Image (cartoon, helix red, strand yellow):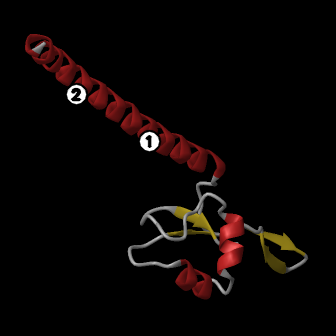
């Protein structure tokens, strides 16, 4: 009986370790794939220019509508909303995938 226990522990311990490592690799790979996919979607849907485009309507300059802001270290949604004279709720509506508790510096968000 002791020999069987010893044999099982010698075989099962490395197998359990390999299974745990494989599961960890799968989890990390999925997280990286999701992050790359989100970055690709963001790049594909945002215009290259961050300044608003204006059109001439009989001498009046009107913004085309979209304005973007690149998040800086230390920014909060409240601060960004105050800077662009809008509300946090409006920013969250314009940026549905944005996590207000985890703003990543360098991320480009729509502000108008």
Which quadrant would the C terminus be assigned to in this image? bottom right
Quadrant in the rendering for residue 109:
bottom right
Helix, strand or loop at mark 1? helix
Q: Which residue is drawn at 43% across and 73% down?
A: 72
Picture layout, residue 45 above or below residue 50? above
Residue 43 placement, left or right of 8: right
Count of residue discs? 2
Q: Residue farthest to the front?
A: 1
Q: Which residue is drawn at 76% across and 69% down?
A: 65
Residue 15 placement, left or right of 43: left
| Residue 92 image offset from top left, x and y in percent | 66, 69
Q: Which of 95 and 53 is in front in this view?
A: 95
Question: Label 1 crowding class (10 Å Cα cut-off): few <14, some 14-19, many 20+?
Answer: few
| Residue 64 image offset from top left, x and y in percent | 77, 67
Q: Nearer the viewer, residue 1 or 68?
A: 1
Q: Read off the residue under disc 2.
A: 17
Q: Residue 31 carries which label?
A: 1
Asked if the residue at tag 1 contacts the one at tag 2, i.e. Cβ–Cβ closer than 8 Å, the answer is: no
| Residue 5 image offset from top left, x and y in percent | 14, 17
Q: Residue at x 49, y 61 (%)?
A: 107
Q: Which residue is drawn at 58% across and 50% down?
A: 42
Q: Which of 88 and 71 is in front in this view?
A: 88
Question: Label 2 crowding class (10 Å Cα cut-off): few <14, some 14-19, many 20+?
Answer: few
N-term-proximal mark, 2 vs 1: 2
């Amino acid at each position: 009986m002791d020999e069987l226990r010893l044999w099982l522990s010698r075989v099962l311990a490395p197998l359990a370790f390999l299974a745990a490592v494989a599961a960890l690799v799968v989890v990390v790979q999925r997280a990286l794939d999701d992050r790359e996919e989100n970055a690709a979607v963001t790049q594909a849907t945002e215009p290259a220019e961050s300044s608003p485009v204006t059109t001439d309507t009989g001498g009046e300059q009107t913004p085309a509508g979209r304005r973007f802001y690149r998040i800086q270290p230390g920014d909060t949604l409240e601060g960004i909303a105050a800077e662009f004279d809008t509300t946090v709720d409006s920013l969250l509506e314009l940026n549905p995938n944005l996590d207000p508790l985890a703003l990543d510096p360098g991320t480009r968000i729509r502000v108008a």
